[in-house]
Amino acid sequence: MTDQPPKKPMPSQIENRDPNEVIILVRNHGPLRVYGPARMIDVNGNEYAIPEGEWFSLCRCGKSETKPFCDSAHKTCDFHAPSDATAP
Ligand code: FES
């Protein structure tokens, strides 16, 4: 028996996406997960690329030691944020 809440199913938009489309999933009280193919370029022009079918997560709690990537620090810093995407 575990105390973990049940995991939410993967949104159908990710399962059925166009393989050339970038999708950003807002994780509940967690990071932004970017599904590739995608390229991230830093201020110095360094590039981090992920192929189709892979993903990386970007920190939005501000506590990651590996910014801009998530290192799961959000799980221990009591991070809470709205996770629905409404237009600004
Ligand atoms: S969102 Fe995961 S470490 Fe910040």
Image (spheres, rainbow, N blue to C red):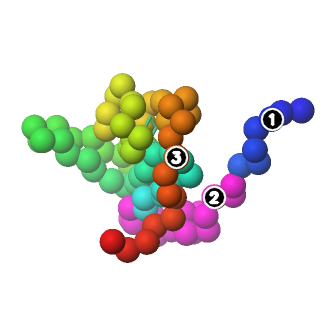
* Residue that label 3 marks: 80
**10 Å crowding of disc 1: few (<14), some (14-19), many (20+):** few
Amino acid type of the residue that numbered disc 3 sits on in the rendered structure: His
Q: Nearer the viewer, mark 2 or mark 3?
A: 3
* Residue that label 1 marks: 3
- Residue 85 magenta: no
The CA span between labels 2 and 1 is 21 Å
Q: Position of residue 47 (x, y in %)?
A: 21, 41
**10 Å crowding of disc 3: few (<14), some (14-19), many (20+):** few
Please state, as top left, top right, bottom left or bottom right, where the N terminus lies in the image: top right
Amino acid type of the residue that numbered disc 2 sits on in the rendered structure: Met
Magenta segment, prevailing SS (helix, strand or loop)? loop
Q: Residue furthest bottom?
A: 87
Q: Is residue 87 above or below residue 74?
A: below
Secondary structure of the residue carrying tag 1 is: loop
* Residue that label 2 marks: 10
Please state, as top left, top right, bottom left or bottom right, where the C terminus lies in the image: bottom left
Residue depicted at x 50% and y 36% = 74
| Horizontal relation, residue 16 to residue 35: left or right | right
The CA span between labels 2 and 3 is 21 Å
The CA span between labels 1 and 3 is 19 Å
Q: Residue furthest top?
A: 65
Q: Residue furthest left?
A: 44
Magenta-drawn segment: 8-22
Q: Is residue 80 visible?
A: yes
Q: Position of residue 44 (x, y in %)?
A: 10, 37
Q: Position of residue 75 (x, y in %)?
A: 56, 34
Secondary structure of the residue carrying tag 3 is: loop
**10 Å crowding of disc 2: few (<14), some (14-19), many (20+):** few
Dot 2 and dot 3 residues touching (CB under 8 Å): no
Q: Nearer the viewer, mark 1 or mark 3?
A: 3
Give 32 or 41, whichever is nearer the viewer. 32
